[in-house]
């Protein structure tokens, strides 16, 4: 299982005298410069027990998963441990609790998260923090900002493109856990809605865990304001109710503190 911990992936090879088997002992000398624990074999010898998958391989896998997740440089260090809710901000505390719960309970979860709220309240930080936590558990994750995803899909229509629309959609729809940032931010053209409906619809049908962030609320604060349903359509919003737990995040825009 991709969400299994490294402890669950241990494979011990025992022999009668409590030392490593001859084959492992010979292989352990294959590349002494590779790793002090496994010497490049990928198997770490456990005295008196046998051998297990070396910790260096688990670290390599974690690094590969992190790089494959496409997390933007600005958010690469976002984690649950460095998220600091504003003082007396109950919505941010609840959002943090929801993110922590998803990570700790995965893969026994049925719903993703939809972080909704104004700019600069920590929605993307928490969403990326979930990816970090899941990657540490060996889960394959993928980050896409909605506008960037739509642009990449459009670029596949160029005859010179080396990627195809089907390949890109397959990767996005097939990701074990997908984060779609800034849902609703793109001008809601028929093509944009149809494309996002295809992505979300396929993940909905496959019961894939998806995390979203959006600046658009479900209730309009004024006549001139748009709701999330206005931006993505009633059909897509309906599916999100079943796919995700909606978490409203409030607070001041933390980015304003840099304008001093």
Image: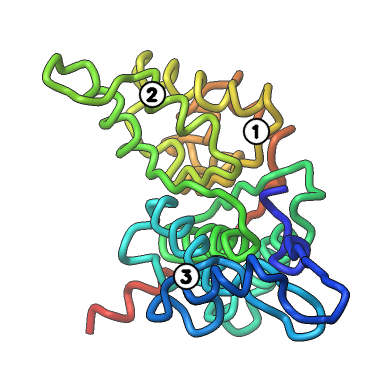
x and y percent of residue 85 in the render? 58, 78
C-alpha separation, residue under disc 2 versus residue under disc 1: 24 Å
Residue holding disc 3: 40
Label 1: state its secondary structure.
helix
The image shows residue 96 at horizontal and vertical percentages of 65, 68
Label 3's element? Answer: loop
Name which quarter of the figure residue 244 lies in: top right
156 relative position to 132: left or right: left
Whether pointer 1 and pointer 3 mark residues with C-beta atoms closer than 8 Å, the reply is no
In the image, which is nearer the foreground, mark 2 or mark 1? Answer: 2
Q: What residue sits right under mark 2 in the picture?
A: 167
**Of the pair 10 and 127, the residue shown nearer to us:** 10
Confirm whether residue 250 shows in the render: no
Q: What is the quadrant of the C terminus in the image?
A: bottom left
Residue annotated with mark 1? 240
Looking at the rendering, which quadrant does residue 92 occupy?
bottom right
Query: Mark 2 near mark 3, Cβ–Cβ under 8 Å?
Result: no
- Compute the Cα span from label 2 to label 3: 34 Å
In the image as oriented, which residue stretches furthest toward the left? 160
Where is residue 226? Give x, y as percent: 46, 35
User: Can the viewer see residue 149?
Assistant: yes
Mark 1 surroundings within 10 Å by alpha-carbon count, few (fewer than 14), some (14 through 19), many (20 or more): many
Q: Earlier in the sequence, mark 1 or mark 3?
A: 3
Residue lying at 53% horizontally and 81% vertically, measured from the top left? 82
């Amino acid at each position: 299982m991709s969400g299994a911990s490294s402890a669950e992936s241990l494979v011990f090879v025992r022999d009668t005298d409590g030392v490593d088997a001859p084959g492992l002992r010979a292989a352990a000398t294959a590349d002494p410069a590779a790793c002090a624990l496994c010497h490049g074999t990928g198997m770490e010898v456990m005295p008196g027990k046998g051998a297990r998958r070396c910790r260096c391989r688990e670290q390599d896998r974690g690094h590969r998963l992190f790089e494959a997740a496409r997390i933007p440089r600005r958010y690469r260090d976002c984690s649950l441990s460095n998220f600091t809710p504003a003082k007396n901000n109950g919505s941010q505390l609840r959002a943090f609790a929801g993110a922590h719960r998803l990570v700790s309970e995965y893969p026994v979860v049925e719903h993703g998260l939809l972080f909704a709220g104004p700019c600069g309240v920590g929605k993307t930080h928490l969403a990326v923090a979930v990816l970090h936590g899941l990657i540490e558990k060996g889960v394959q994750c993928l980050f896409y900002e909605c506008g960037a995803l739509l642009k990449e899909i459009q670029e596949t229509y160029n005859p010179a493109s080396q990627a195809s629309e089907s390949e890109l959609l397959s990767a996005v729809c097939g990701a074990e856990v997908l984060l779609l940032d800034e849902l609703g931010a793109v001008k809601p053209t028929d093509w944009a809605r149809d494309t996002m409906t295809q992505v979300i619809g396929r993940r909905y049908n496959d019961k894939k865990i998806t995390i979203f962030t959006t600046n658009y609320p479900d209730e309009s604060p004024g006549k001139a304001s748009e709701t999330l349903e206005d931006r993505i359509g009633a059909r897509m919003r309906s599916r999100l109710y079943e796919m995700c737990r909606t978490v409203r995040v409030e607070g001041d825009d933390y980015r304003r503190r840099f304008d001093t």
